[in-house]
Image (cartoon, rainbow, N blue to C red):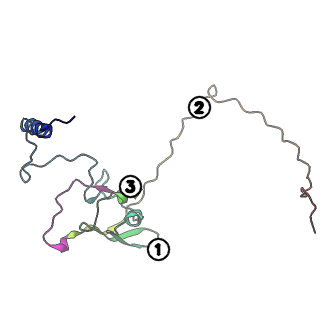
Amino acid sequence: MRIYGTGILKSMLIAYRNMLRKPITVQYPQEKVELPERARWAVALDYDEEGQHKCTGCLACVRACPDYVLDLQMTTAEDRSKHIDHYRYEIGACMMCGLCVEACPFSAIKMSHDYELARIDPDTLTVDLLTDVPAAVPKRKTPAVEPAKSAAEAPAAEEPVAEAPAAEPTEPAVPEGGADV
């Protein structure tokens, strides 16, 4: 059985509960919200410890981008060294999906925390990330070298295993009913 007016009482209870809470309003230009580490906004370059860019010009990010907002033009010299002519990014068309960052095998790009992306001039929606620089040389991971083992730690030499005798050739199986040759 429904009691008349319970809906009004529930809504009043919710209103009074929210009146007692602290305000959550942020005065935007003066205060800014701390973004979580995994927030995805505009694409930015990532640099190594020496301050050099990590982009090797492998084009993995360009191929992974579903909106085609990354443009990487480069030239390759005769000694197979790469030179990045320009690496452009269109902020206005990017949907901030992060697929380009996931596709980069050298962690050369990252999603920045810059969320103030509004522009007055549409020409400023295209950003040159790199212009006229040599591509980074990929750093190869060196395998860990095991220390030399002493004679006591070395496993005993295995005895040679005798080879099994060669199997005799068998005739191919003939299906039932015979085979016409």
Amino acid type shown at disc 2: Lys
Q: Which residue is mark 2?
A: 149
Camera-nearest label, 2 or 3: 3
Q: Which residue is mark 1?
A: 78
Q: CA distance from mark 2 to mark 3?
A: 40 Å
Q: CA distance from mark 2 to mark 1?
A: 45 Å
Q: Which residue is mark 3?
A: 102
| Label 2 vs 3, first from the N-terminus | 3
Q: Which stretch is magenta? A: 105-124
**Quadrant in which residue 139 is drawn:** bottom left
Q: Residues within 10 Å of mark 3 (few under 14, many from 20)?
A: some
Q: Front-most of 121 and 162?
A: 121
**Quadrant in which residue 156 is drawn:** top right
Magenta: main secondary structure equals: loop
Position of residue 122 measured from the top left corner of the image (x, y, whole percent):
18, 73
Amino acid type shown at disc 3: Glu
Q: Is residue 19 left or right of residue 137?
A: left
